[in-house]
Image (cartoon, helix red, strand yellow):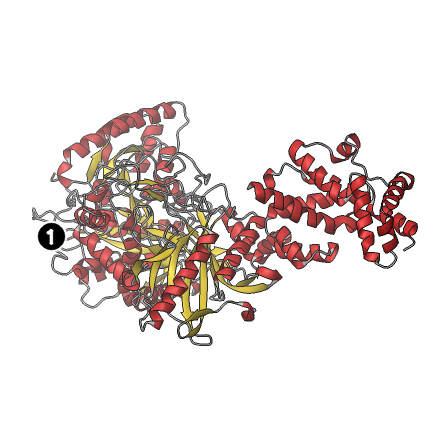
Amino acid sequence: MTDLTSLTLAEARKGLADKTFTSLELTDAHLSAIEAARVLNAFVMETPDQARAMAREADAKIAKDDAGPLAGIPLGIKDLFATKGVRTTACSKILGNFVPTYESTVTSQLWRDGAVMLGKLNNDEFAMGSANETSCFGPVGNPWRREGSNTTLVPGGSSGGSASAVAALLCMGATATDTGGSIRQPAAFTATVGIKPTYGRCSRWGIVAFASSLDQAGPIARSVRDAAMLLRSMAGHDPKDTTSVDIAVPNYEAAIGKSVKGMKIGIPREYRLDGMPAEIDRLWSEGRAWLEAAGAETVEVSLPHTKYALPAYYIVAPAEASSNLARYDGVRYGLREQGKTITELYENTRAEGFGAEVRRRVMIGTYVLSAGYYDAYYLRAQKVRTLIKKDFEDCFAGGVDAILTPATPSAAFGIGEKGGADPVEMYLNDIFTVTVNMAGLPGIAVPAGKDAQGLPLGLQLIGRPFEEETLFSLGEVIEQAAGRFTPARWW
Amino acid sequence: MSTATHKLLKGATGDWEVVIGMEIHAQVTSNAKLFSGASTAFGGEPNSQVSLVDVAMPGMLPVINEECVRQAVRTGLGLNAKINLRSVFDRKNYFYPDLPQGYQISQYASPIVGEGEVTVELDGGKTATVGIERLHLEQDPGKMLHDQSPSMSYIDFNRCGVALMEIVSKPDIRDAEQAKAYVTKLRSIMRYLGTCDGDMEKGSLRADVNVSVRKPGAPLGTRCEIKNMNSITFIGQAIEYEARRQIEIIEDGGKIEQETRRFDPDKGETRSMRSKEEAHDYRYFPDPDLLPLEFSQAFVDELKAKLPELPDQKKARFVADFGLSAYDASVLVAERESALFYETVLDKLANRARDGKMAANWVINELFGRLNKEGRDITGSPVGAEQLAAIIDLIGEGTISGKIAKDLFEIVWQEGGDPRALVESRGMKQVTDLSAIEKVVDDIIAANPDKAAQVKDKPQSLGWFVGQVMKASGGKANPQSVNDLLKSKLGV
């Protein structure tokens, strides 16, 4: 029998159904892999007992042919998702040992469909970061290294633990969240597939909020098909989240292998940045050629307000975050640092509980919402957001089915290499991904090749609202053409 | 606004006009909170009615309670106000332990209800109109408990997240009497609608009062806001005090600083809480967890069609149908329960058109008078509407006199029972039998020949004879019959 951890989710599903192996065997294989890969720091909490119990339950159901679509599949859960009875911290000291009495809607749907929880995955503190370096549990290692180098690289962020764990074969798939690129950028850095669905596709209930109007859950997986399978269970209307949309969830897997012939793919000229590495440009052209070879038509399109997206994002997201994070005040749960007055208690708790990046964004957000600055910053950023959205609408109205862009402006970089002196250097990682959140659209990152140092690079496809199926069809074309990439094990 | 009626205050430098605007916080009558399913019942064990949303657990999201929306729209309709088919919930950000989210969900730029107006009743049957600026929905915070421990404060989150309507008036109010009348009227309208129970002792209705003073005709002065008033009497006292305080400062050459003040009912004075400089910057912005609140005109029309009759309409109807004075009608409609009682009496009357007005007099003078004396309210009245209607029927049909009726009322008050049966069993029936009265009349005329002789010259002394006959008959003689009989016997 081959190593069970190297299977895709789709292959594992077949093996379980055929009784080639049990979920308990599959789960144990992954638990061992997790144990052996602790140096990556992908998991911040391992739940082996719970995993085995869930696996046994799944096996019993499979035996009775009463199995859900994800029965027995071991998954990792980003620590931003509330898990009942299992510590949930958003990788912030301020939540301390917070144990929710409730389960997020997205994870409860995964368990409903039979999935098994292996543990909680590392992420940037409150999902604020692009390298998974702001976590209170320390940075995550990328299973990929530059050829001939021992330098540990970042897996991207904020869903760095999710991407690293999936790439290192520690779990068959993982939940993730994306506010400005937090699913797609780490997927691109680790040669995994990550999709951020349309805003409103997945319930935000029970997910620790960063920026409510931008946050969306989605999966990181080993293949496009796996991502489709996971999203089908994660998505759906939830009356507890009034921003979730009541549209039936299609069988996304059915879109895999569907012909893309005649589809019109937009290539936005504003995404060709000055000083962009030649290999990124080359990858982009390659992707274009693959889609054309599959029968799609590519056209140059314009998204004129693209350059304002990142600055506007760094006003809207911190503004919402400054308010969303006000609840972490040391009064009811989580960390409390005493003070002589209530104000001192707030100041001590929040100074001690929040890391530097979170403090920075809370300060920026508070500033841009202040009397006298609101119009100049927040209101203006919202107007920019409307224009960005309109750019895409115009493009889709012109008959474009999807837009192809690079996923990131570079491959993964070393821990501590970026953003130390200038946080904007780090923020630029999201230059290709934030527009999608600002417009509420679905976006998928698919592995497409490697750079000169042997590091994975990804392409991004952006779709019309609620047309994730188009992205799965096109993503699979790229996947087929580019092949799949697995890191050499060094841990 | 009938500006001619309001009171000016005399200062050392002449007359001053007081300008008052109010923000009323009215707790919405609903079973569940504004954004969570937790109960709103009053008086539960601390923290027994709290949901995960109320205490802002990580990842919790608000979901609007449609019943609260309906109640706000109904209230808006009751205030003759514009209903906004699209409104927006905003976050009002500030830190306080009783505010778990770190922000209150409120409505800032786009409230659910826009401009309206209410007519308020003043002394002597006068009225004034007060403009409504807006009404919006927002969450109530929790409650701090400082008396549970010497070293710590506790928080009860039961109230946290309960829906409030903040009703903002225009600065149309000119003296304490109008201010009190305004709160009274708002309370009355909401109680009729069933949108707020108006119980000020339980904190269901609280007022922030903005007071400034100016010389008549001058531009508006700097205002001070007196926070969290929960008694109509205190509102009046606070305004009187605050206006005087401001006039004194200005007349002494000082300046009013814009600030928030608190009223101390024991000392009858207002005291500074915080200055404008200490005021929060609330950093309002649209709540991204909630979509704009939108509903159709048909939704509003349906609520409008089902509104109960409101105090102003009821008052007009009482005046038109039963000939009540405007004052009496407004006394009856001021409280929903009083109006209901009066209307039940009307329903039970044998002849409503004839006795409706008499019924109003009885409710206002005899019943309310007696209830006030004993400190009881209408819902605890020992004399029920049906009993009172029976008493009035007995008067109206001539079975008993008004005077006997008062005795009968007293018996019913003390002992209960069916008034008609009591009249029978206790022999209280009015004597209309002429032969029975005639004997008494003859006796009295015979005993008072001097007075009888005088009557022709002094017809007004007939009243003395009437009184004597009534006394002799124990009040049971029919006064009209006695009168007629005396006139014929005495040749008047």
Query: Relative to residue A336, is residue B85 depicted above or below?
Result: below
Quarter of the image where one finds residue B457: bottom right
Q: Residue A99: image x %, image y %?
A: 27, 35
Residue A428 is situated, as x and y percent measured from the top left of the image, at 21, 60
Answer left or right for A365 relative to A246. left
Residue shown at 26%/59% (left/top)? A366
Work out whether residue A403 can be spotted.
no
* In the depicted structure, whether residue B98 falls above or below residue B269: above
Location of the C terminus of chain A by quadrant is top left
Name the quarter where the N terminus of chain A is drawn: top left
Q: Position of residue A409 (x, y in %)?
A: 21, 59
For this rendering, which residue is in front, A125 or B241? B241
Residue appearing at x 54%, y 70% in the figure = B3
As rendered, which of A412 and A256 lies closer to the eye? A412
Dot 1: what SS? loop
Q: Position of residue B345 (x, y in %)?
A: 71, 43
| Residue A237 is at least partly visible in this image | yes
Q: Is residue A387 left or right of residue A421?
A: right
Question: Label 1 belongs to which residue?
Answer: A416
Read off the chain for label 1: A
Q: Amino acid at mark 1?
A: Gly
In which image quadrant can residue A4 be found?
A: top left
Mark 1 burial class by Cα count in 10 Å: few <14, some 14-19, many 20+: few
Position of residue B294 in the picture relative to residue A468 (left or right):
right
